Image (cartoon, rainbow, N blue to C red):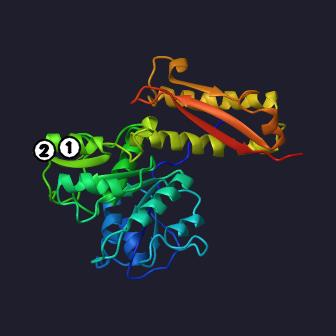
């Protein structure tokens, strides 16, 4: 049975709005639809602006949650970011603090990054207003969560919607494995950048996990960096497209193999799984998702008695190990997908 590709660029916005349902994610597919549901007033620090920038830069689908100022909210009550428990999937999370406030607290960023790790999503972080120079950014980044599922962009604030739209545009035109960075990664509807960065500052910031925005004569604002906030010892997920590709593979394989849960957990099933996952990866290979001249150099799939032991079988687990060579870096990244089986 063929494995379908899951969506990669559904955005989720959480912030204040003058009207609309509270703590109830609403699927929005245009800036006009947002205005009709939540109002177009800009007084609550840019939720409307962020959503508009998302669609202007190539986004097509977004869940918008109007919530109180107590981010991250309550998991038990499904408020704040946890209102997104009500939706099946989102890929990119943007938080908008209230206008005139002190910005988003570090604990909120940590909770949001942890939630994105659970949901196979990326957290896009706008820098606080205190980041007025490269030096301030280098100090400030140390207080952000070191997570492979988070990324921060500097300078200028409240551009997470535009970045999410750019990622959606890149996914649609080239694939989730391509970085939304470089000369072609232009942001539209953006004013001048508040801080000019030298090449040396850009290099230092990139090395610290801060993605920079730059201006060129014929390219007003472009994204110049594709780093996650992963810890330095997490070498395989230092780059946003590598992490997003891994999340895409995990979700696609996991959801595409839900039919296996009622099957006998043995070699006949494992053989079917190997074929299905190899076919899925082979299609991505032909689209240019992986490094390598041949399939054997680009990816592998393991599902056998070594990945799923007798103890796993008795505990209702089936383990699939997928390795792939991303475009950058070229080393293999290993992903393990575990299905919980129905014990008979």
Tell me the distance, in whole angstroms, between the alpha carbons under discs 2 and 1: 6 Å
Judging depth in this view, the residue of 208 and 305 nearest the camera is 208
Q: Position of residue 190 (x, y in %)?
A: 21, 59
314 shown above or below 136: above
Give residue 198's mark.
2
Is 57 displayed left or right of 332 in the figure? left
Q: Name which residue lies at 55% across and 18% down.
A: 296
Is residue 134 visible to us here? yes
> Which residue appears farthest toward the bottom when viewing the image?
19
Asked which secondary structure carries label 1, the reply is helix
Label 2 close to label 1 by CB (< 8 Å): yes
Which corner quadrant of the image does residue 156 belong to? bottom left
Q: Is residue 344 above or below residue 131?
A: above
In this figure, what is the number of numbered marks?
2
Residue 307 lies left or right of residue 208; in this view the side is right
Q: Position of residue 83 (x, y in %)?
A: 54, 70
Whether residue 35 is situated above or below residue 60 in the rendered picture? below
Q: Which residue is mark 1?
A: 202
Question: Relative to 330, does residue 99 appear above or below in the rendering?
Answer: below
Question: Which of the numbered marks, if any, corresponds to residue 1?
Answer: none
């Amino acid at each position: 049975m063929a494995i379908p590709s899951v969506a990669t660029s559904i955005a989720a916005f959480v912030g204040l709005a003058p009207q609309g349902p509270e703590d109830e994610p609403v699927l929005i597919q245009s800036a006009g639809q947002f205005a009709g549901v939540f109002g177009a007033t800009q007084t609550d620090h840019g939720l409307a602006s962020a959503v508009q920038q998302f669609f202007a830069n190539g986004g097509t689908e977004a869940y918008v949650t109007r919530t109180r100022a107590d981010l991250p909210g309550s998991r038990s009550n499904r408020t704040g970011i946890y209102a997104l428990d009500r939706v099946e999937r989102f890929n990119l999370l943007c938080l908008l603090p209230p206008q005139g406030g002190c910005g988003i607290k570090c604990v909120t960023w940590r909770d949001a990054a942890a939630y994105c790790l659970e949901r196979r999503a990326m957290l896009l972080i706008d820098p606080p207003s205190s980041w007025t120079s490269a030096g301030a950014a280098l100090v400030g980044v140390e207080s952000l969560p070191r997570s492979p599922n988070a990324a921060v962009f500097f300078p200028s604030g409240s551009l997470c919607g535009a970045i999410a739209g750019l990622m959606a545009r890149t996914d649609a035109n080239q694939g989730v494995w391509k970085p939304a960075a470089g000369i072609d990664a232009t942001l539209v509807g953006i004013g001048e950048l508040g801080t000019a960065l030298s090449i040396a500052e850009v290099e230092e910031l990139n090395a610290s996990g801060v993605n920079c925005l730059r201006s060129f004569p014929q390219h007003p604002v472009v994204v110049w960096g594709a780093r996650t906030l992963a810890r330095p010892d997490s070498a395989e997920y230092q780059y946003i497209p590598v992490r997003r590709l891994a999340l895409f593979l995990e979700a696609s394989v996991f959801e595409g193999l839900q039919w296996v849960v009622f099957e006998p957990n043995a070699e006949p099933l494992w053989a079917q799984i190997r074929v299905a996952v190899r076919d899925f990866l082979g299609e991505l290979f032909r689209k240019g998702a992986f490094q390598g001249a041949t399939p054997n150099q680009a990816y592998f799939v393991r599902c056998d008695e070594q990945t799923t032991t007798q103890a796993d079988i008795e505990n209702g687990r089936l383990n699939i190990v997928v390795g792939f060579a991303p475009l950058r870096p070229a080393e293999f990244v290993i992903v393990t997908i575990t299905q919980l089986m129905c014990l008979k």
